[in-house]
Amino acid sequence: MHLGPKRILLLTLGILFSAHARSQVSITTFNSAIVDTFTGFDFDGTSVPVNWTISSGETFKGYGTGSSTSTGVWSYGSDATGVNTDRWLGFLFGGSPSNLVTFTKSYINNTGSTISTLLISYDAFQFRSANGGYISYFDVNINGGSSIGALNFTSVNSLPTGVQTPIVATNRSITLSGLSLSDGQTFSLNFVGDRGTGTGSSQGIGLDNISVTAVPEPSTYAAILGAVALLGAVLIRRRRQLIPV
């Protein structure tokens, strides 16, 4: 069972009291993806990825491969030492202190125009399986609003217990239209992770390659193309004036 909009909103408001607050990421141009790969982060309890917040009350475990049953926030990867800096933002919860974690990144529209469409995508991974255990999942929302179904990820509990090899990426993406994010307005992208329903142990799941791209309105495209065409015409005219007759 996934979180309802009201519950998600309450959880997101709780992020405001997180001790790990970071600044907003500036979106300055259209059609330019802002991507998080979590390279090099260890989640040692003293630092989190830059520009992200993680809901308070969770235990930071550092590096892991999915072999450990210790619950908390993990930097998942192919090793438990951090030698391989290609990491994933992950969690595995057992009900204490919470079944939930919320990862949040805030953005600010500095394009000079209203953003009406966002392209959002990410890769979800299952690093550890507990056969027959809880079915863990991520619900994704903007500004604490309704869950965006196309971006949600649900793990499975039918795999053999232990580390999953190989780790398979499940891509989630959407073109989110109908927005009205004015210039200077901020918004947050929230990944609400839940231990899920069932009994037994939880699944260890992670996030990577989180990408956000602002797409201009068709009218903006027309204005840009018109400006390019006008500039081209001016350059051609000047060039002709410089050519000796």
Image: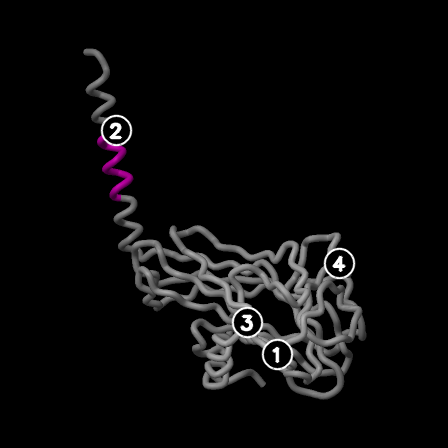
The quadrant of the rendering that contains the N terminus is bottom right
Find residue 76 and report its image quarter: bottom right
Quote the CA–CA distance across marks 4 and 3.
29 Å
The residue carrying mark 4 is: 78
Q: Does the magenta stretch include residue 232?
A: yes
Mark 2 vs mark 1: which is more N-terminal?
A: 1
Quote the CA–CA distance across marks 1 and 3.
10 Å
The residue carrying mark 2 is: 235
Decide: marks 2, 3 in contact (CB < 8 A)?
Answer: no
| Number of other residues with Cα within 10 Å of mark 2, as a class: few under 14, some 14 to 19, many 20 or more | few
The image's mark for residue 57 is 1
Quote the CA–CA distance across marks 2 and 3.
54 Å
| Number of other residues with Cα within 10 Å of mark 4, as a class: few under 14, some 14 to 19, many 20 or more | many
Mark 1 vs mark 3: which is more N-terminal?
A: 3
The image's mark for residue 14 is none
Q: Is residue 110 magenta?
A: no
Decide: marks 2, 4 in contact (CB < 8 A)?
Answer: no
Decide: marks 4, 3 in contact (CB < 8 A)?
Answer: no
Q: Which of marks 2 and 1 is in front?
A: 1
Mark 4 vs mark 3: which is more N-terminal?
A: 3
Is 97 situated above or below 27?
Answer: below
